[in-house]
Amino acid sequence: MRCFRLHAKPTPPFMGDIPKSRFEQGRPFLRVALDMGGPYLLKDGNRRNSPVIKAYIAIFVCMSTRCMHLELVTSLTTEACLAALDRFISRRGLPTHLVSDNGTNYRGSARHISDVQAFLKASDSHVHKFLADREISWSFHPPGAPNFSGLAEAGIKSTKFHLKRVLSDQALRYEEFYTLLVKIEASLNSRPLYALSSSPDDGFDYLSPGHFLIGAPLLARPDYDISDQKISPLQRWSFTIL
């Protein structure tokens, strides 16, 4: 009689808990992941022979609702990062927590914000109480660990997917590039947050990040299809059509 030894199956490793920031309730953009991508070519002026400079994309991703906000910056300095952050806060509200990698522009921005908050807190007790609920905390990923910024990295990848198919190595002006970037932002904020049903009886309603912003998906105005047309210099604005 042949005997068989039963081997116990290896126990799969336990997954860690989902971070609280991924399901914490509140308005969009309270906890934000920040990253930058690029460079891209940008025409510095309206003349035909205007010099071409580099431009970068700053992406802000809400860690709970997956809403995205895109900004166009022309350098990777601390000043440009703070300017993009100011534009983001003016339109999306003040975040409570920012997450990024260890870039020198992020480190410089976080140090500037921390110094300003420490100065204001030390000046007056009333100011300290006022800033208690308005303080921005900034945390950084471990060095050499881009996987810790999965939301922002995925957002940069999706943005580049659209830019690659629209630009085709074409250098746009600032207004043209920024208009295209905002249209891509609306497209990304209109994607469904879950897998859609294949049954036609289930309807076409779905939940998107745009529902957390305006209560519905973000739509673009109707326009002509110029995908098979050659764009002349007098029709440069056609480059912004997705």
Image: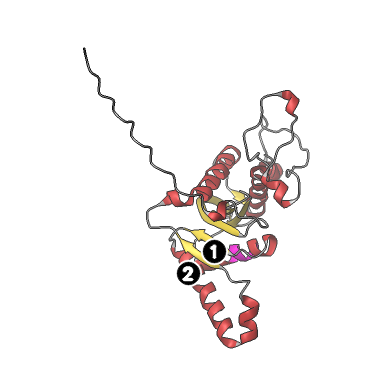
> What colour scheme does the image use?
secondary structure
Between disc 1 and disc 2, whose residue precedes? 1
- Left or right: residue 98 versus residue 27 is left
Q: In the rendered structure, are the residues bearing label 1 and label 2 in contact, judged by CB atoms less than 8 Å apart?
A: yes
Secondary structure mostly taken by the magenta-highlighted segment of the chain:
helix
> How far is disc 1 from disc 2 in space, using C-alphas?
9 Å
Q: The N terminus lies in which quarter of the figure?
A: top left
Residue positioned 51% across, 53% down in the render:
19
In the image, residue 64 lies at what x, y percent? 60, 51
Above or below — where is 104 with respect to 16?
Answer: below
Q: Nearer the viewer, residue 85 or 5?
A: 5
- The kind of secondary structure element at disc 1 is helix
Residue positioned 53% across, 80% down in the render:
118
Residue sticking out furthest to the right: 222
Q: Which mark is residue 34?
A: none
Magenta highlight range: 83-87
Q: Nearer the viewer, residue 169 or 216?
A: 216
Amino acid carrying label 1: it is Cys
Residue sticking out furthest to the top: 1
What residue is disc 2 on?
Answer: 108
Q: In this orientation, does residue 53 appear?
A: no
84 magenta-colored: yes
What residue is disc 1 on?
Answer: 81
- Left or right: residue 163 versus residue 204 is left
* Quadrant assignment, res 225: top right
Disc 2 crowd, CA 10 A, few/some/many (<14, 14-19, 20+): some
